[in-house]
């Protein structure tokens, strides 16, 4: 059924960049046979999933949305996808994404933009973005082209597309999911996580995806709880922080109203809401847009035409010419912009002023959260609730000319990455145009259970 739906809708949505139908049917039949024989089934046995094209999949082309990896077929499986296969999942194919996960609208993919399955009531012909960078995963799940999907989040790429497409998505604590076999963007911020139609489905998927992996030195050796059980937990007595810095000037009144409504629901369910301050929030976006490009410029140095993917032949045996031609032809405009910013802020003479300064501000942003989450602190909150995005999905031709306007999409999401904390986006209602809006729940490090409990209460 999912493969038929992909055939019917993918030509319009472009959510999948590869469909592995035969493999999927083979695994689905094997799952049916196990069921018929009465064998023990895995927690995801037969569950049809989309896999973001940033995860290496053995024998299946993995492009990261880039021309430079256009012909790359990994000889190995990422840890996260291997964990899902171990638990019985069926992969339908690879989902589209912004090039190297850089973007908020899924318009930077070398394999073409993704369209959001939702439309505005008053202008149903306008094509809207699904958000990014995991736009293919979010659009696929929203349009019923997968039951769930893997995604990654460096500055919001799980939560923002989930919000734009009316589904749920969680970025777990940094270290919860192994990054091994996930094409690197900004290694100190990147985290894998699921998108799915419900908070509970996200919980089931995250449990399978998580776990310590000796192949990733930043993977955390901590137990993986039964996240799905946490979805049914009462929120009674929880203290929910409402950060005043997230009340932005010019934010649509509908988003403000939805936020208030969510807090009302939590109070009705017995939680207590408290106004808090995260004073360094205003520096989060500039900090992110220094740290992330810096790490990206270093990570992307490996695409040189020698070791991976695309190679554009040099002239006169000049190695530098080979690098330049390959990278000029292989990277898109947004990736080049990030490599230039990153190289600049890391260069001698500017390193202290930009990169080192950004790292110091990052520590202050993290400290803001530590203080409100401290069990003996003045605020003592258990979770924080904010809007997921400052707007609903926008048109495919909007915000494309000005990178800074595009970066503003991430204003509510980058903080959790800079602090390494778990954050979920939950569909919370529709705006006047009938477009979905999301609320975000941020929790303490490795306390995804509270995040799921509060998320499920908001759903
Ligand atoms: N939109 C942000 C960026 O362009 C975040 C991307 C992400 O989380 N991968 O960097």
Image (spheres, helix red, strand yellow):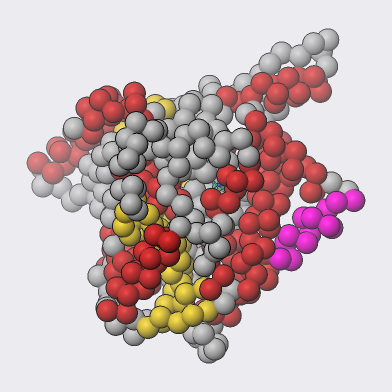
Q: Residue at x 52, y 79 (%)?
A: 276
Specify the principal SS of the magenta part.
helix
Q: Please state, as top left, top right, bottom left or bottom right, where the C terminus lies in the image.
A: bottom left
Q: Is residue 312 above or below residue 91?
A: above
Q: Residue at x 43, y 69 (%)?
A: 385
> Foreground: 192 or 157?
157
Q: On the image, which quarter does residue 372 sit in?
A: bottom right
Q: Is residue 440 left or right of residue 204?
A: right
> Foreground: 403 or 19?
403
Percent position (x, y) of residue 140? Answer: 33, 38
Q: Residue at x 54, y 23 (%)?
A: 70
Percent position (x, y) of residue 64? Answer: 53, 34
Taking the magenta stretch, the answer to whether it contains residue 355 is yes
Q: On the image, which quarter does residue 426 sit in?
A: bottom left
Q: Residue at x 45, y 42 (%)?
A: 394
Percent position (x, y) of residue 181? Answer: 52, 42
Q: Is residue 211 above or below residue 348?
A: below
Percent position (x, y) of residue 307? Answer: 66, 27
Q: Is residue 159 above or below residue 339?
A: below
**Boundaries of the magenta span:** 349-361
Looking at the rendered structure, the number of numbered marks drawn on it comes to: 0
Taking the magenta stretch, the answer to whether it contains residue 352 is yes
Q: Is residue 340 left or right of residue 38?
A: right
């Amino acid at each position: 059924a999912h493969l038929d739906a992909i055939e019917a809708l993918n030509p319009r949505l472009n959510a999948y960049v590869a469909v592995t139908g035969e493999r999927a049917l083979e695994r689905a039949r094997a799952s049916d046979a196990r069921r018929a024989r009465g064998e023990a089934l895995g927690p995801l046995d037969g569950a049809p999933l989309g896999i973001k094209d940033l995860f290496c999949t053995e024998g299946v082309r993995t492009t990261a949305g880039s021309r430079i990896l256009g012909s790359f077929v990994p000889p190995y499986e990422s840890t996260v996808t291997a964990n899902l296969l171990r638990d019985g999942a069926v992969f339908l194919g690879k989902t589209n994404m912004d090039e190297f996960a850089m973007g908020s609208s899924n318009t930077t993919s070398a394999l073409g933009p993704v369209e959001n399955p939702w439309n505005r009531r008053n202008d149903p012909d306008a094509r809207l973005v699904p958000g990014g960078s995991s736009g293919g995963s979010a659009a696929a799940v929203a349009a019923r082209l997968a039951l769930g999907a893997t995604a990654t989040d460096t500055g919001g790429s799980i939560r923002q597309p989930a919000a734009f497409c009316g589904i749920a998505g969680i970025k777990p604590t940094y270290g919860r999911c192994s990054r091994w076999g996930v094409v690197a963007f900004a290694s100190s911020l990147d985290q894998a996580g699921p998108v799915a139609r419900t908070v509970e489905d996200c919980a089931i998927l995250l449990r399978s995806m998580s776990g310590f992996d000796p192949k990733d030195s930043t993977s955390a050796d901590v137990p993986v709880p039964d996240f799905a059980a946490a979805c049914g937990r009462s929120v009674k007595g929880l203290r929910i922080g409402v950060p005043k810095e997230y009340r932005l000037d010019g934010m649509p009144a509908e988003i403000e109203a939805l936020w208030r409504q969510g807090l009302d629901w939590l109070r009705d369910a017995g939680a207590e809401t408290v106004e808090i301050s995260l004073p360094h929030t205003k520096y989060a976006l500039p900090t992110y847009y220094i740290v992330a490009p810096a790490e990206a410029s270093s990570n992307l140095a490996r695409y040189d035409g020698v070791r991976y993917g695309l190679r554009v032949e040099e002239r006169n045996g000049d190695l530098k010419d080979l690098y330049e031609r390959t990278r000029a032809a292989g990277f898109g405009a947004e990736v080049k912009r990030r490599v230039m910013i990153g190289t600049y802020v890391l260069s001698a003479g500017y390193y202290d002023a930009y990169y080192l300064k950004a790292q110091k501000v990052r520590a202050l942003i993290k400290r803001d959260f530590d203080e409100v989450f401290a069990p003996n602190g003045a605020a003592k909150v258990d979770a924080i609730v904010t809007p997921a995005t400052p707007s609903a999905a926008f048109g495919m031709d909007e915000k494309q000319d000005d990178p800074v306007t595009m970066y503003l999409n991430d204003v509510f999401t980058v903080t959790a990455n800079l602090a390494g904390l778990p954050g979920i986006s939950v569909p919370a209602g529709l705006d006047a145009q009938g477009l979905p809006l999301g609320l975000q729940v941020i929790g303490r490090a490795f306390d995804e259970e509270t995040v799921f409990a509060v998320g499920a209460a908001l759903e």
